[in-house]
Image (tube, grey):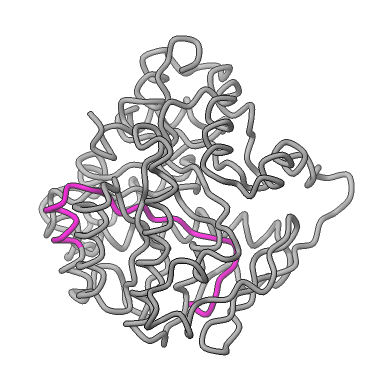
Amino acid sequence: MKDGFKIMDSDMHLREPADLWDQYMEPEWRGRRPKILSSTARSSAMVMIDGKILEGYEPTYRGGIYDATRIDQEIAEFRARGFDAKTQLVAMDREGLDVAALYPSIGLGIMMREEMDPKLAAAIARAYNNWLYDLCQTDPNRLKGVAMLALHDPHEAVKEAERAVGKLGFVGVFARPEPLRGLPWHSRYFDSVWSCLEELGVPMGFHSATAAGEVAQIGARFGNNLLLRHVVSHPLENMVAMADTIGGGVCERHPKLKLAFLECYCGWVSFLLHRMDNAMAKGRYPTAGKLKPSEYFRRQCWISTEHEQELPMIIDLIGDDNIVFSTDYPHGDSDYPHAVDEFLEMKGVSQLSQKKILWDNCARLYGLD
C-alpha cells in the first residue's frame, strides 16, 4: 500500500534460475530439459533444447541516450541472492505493492518454436509451473502465479491450465501474442483453450518479448537493435492479437473469457478500437460478432499501463474500467523502485481512476475480488 492505495502489479517479472529445468523436469524428460547457456544483465538468454539453440540477442546501446545500467544497480543485491522469493517480496515492499501477478523472463520465449515436440513442451511448462508454485508458497497471499502453457497441443494446454488453477492455485495463464503454428488466435484450433479458461474464470495474459525465437515477429527484422526491437514488438504484436481475438470472433464465441494485453502501453488502444468499430460499421468485420469491437473490449479485455503521458487522454476516450497497473520489474526499462510514485504523480488522473487502475481492475481481472 502507498499513499492510501492498495496496489496490485498486473505484470511483475521473475528471473528464473539457470538450473530451474535441471531441478524441476520430470525424470523421464530430464535428458531433454532446456539448458540455459547464457543470460547476463546485458543480454537475453540463449537456451538449448534437444541440441538446438534458441538464440537470444546481444543488445546495442548508444552512450548518453539511456542509462542502461540504472536498473542493474537497483537490483544488484537481488541478483546476488538469485532473485529468490524473499527478494521479490522486498522489491514489492519498496514499491508499495500489496500483491503481484508473476510472469517469467526466460520463460516468455522458451516455447517459441513451431516444431517443438508437444509432449516435451508440456513437460517444460509443468516444470516451470511447479517451480513457480514453490516460489509462491513463501507468501501465497501476495505472490500470485500465472501459468505457462504449451500451446503446441491444445489438449495438453487445457490439462495444464486445469492443474495450474485447480491444484496450484494460479490466477491466470500467459502466452506470447504471436501464435504458434502460423494460425490466428481466432482459429478453432484454440477454442478448447478459450473454453477451458472461461470455465476456470482466469485470464489469458498476452505478453510479448524482445527475443523472437523461431516464430515470426515484427521486431526480428531489426537484429540486435534493442531499441527498435523493443519499441515495436510489444505494442504492435499486442495490437494484432487484440484485433485478432476481438475481430475474429473469439470474444463473441467465448463471452466469459478474460483477455489481458500486457507491457505494451495503452496509448494506442483507442485508435485501434475506433478503427475496428469503423470497419465493422462498413461491413468489413463479418466475423467479429453482434457487438462493436469496443464493446467486446469493455466487456472482457484489460490493458496495462506504466508511466505514460497519454493515460489521461485514454481514460477520457475509453474510460478507466479496463486499465491495470504494471511495474515491469526487474526489466531494463522498468521505473522500479519509483514506478508507483511516478504513476501517482501524473497530472490529470483522478483519485478514483488511480484506485481502479492500481487495484480494483487488476483484482477483477485476476479474480481476487
User: Does residue 118 lie above or below 58 as drawn?
Assistant: below
The answer to whether residue 212 is left or right of residue 315 is right
Q: Measuring from the top left, give residue 331's x and y in whole percent.
A: 62, 47
Q: Measuring from the top left, give residue 10's x and y in whole percent.
A: 41, 39
The answer to whether residue 226 is left or right of residue 178 is right
Q: Looking at the image, how many numbered discs can be counted on the residues?
A: 0
Q: Which residue is rendered at x = 54% and y = 25% of the image? A: 93
Task: Please state which of residues 246 and 355 is positioned toward the viewer in this rendering.
Answer: 355
The C terminus lies in which quarter of the figure?
top left
Q: Measuring from the top left, give residue 158's x and y in whole percent.
A: 20, 67
User: Does residue 158 lie above or below 265 as drawn?
Assistant: below
User: Does residue 52 lie above or below 238 as drawn?
Assistant: below
Q: Which residue is rendered at x = 62% and y = 54% of the image? A: 231
Q: Quadrant of residue 356?
A: top left
Q: Measuring from the top left, give residue 293's x and y in whole percent.
A: 24, 50
Q: Which residue is rendered at x = 58% and y = 76% of the image? A: 35
Q: Does the magenta stretch include residue 214?
A: yes
User: Does residue 246 lie above or below 110 as drawn?
Assistant: above
The answer to whether residue 79 is left or right of residue 145 is right
Q: Which residue lies furthest to the right in this view?
A: 63
Task: Please state which of residues 327 and 72 is positioned toward the viewer in this rendering.
Answer: 72
Q: Does the magenta stretch include residue 204?
A: yes
Q: Which residue is rendered at x = 23% and y = 52% of the image? A: 165
Task: Magenta stretch: give its range.
Answer: 194-215
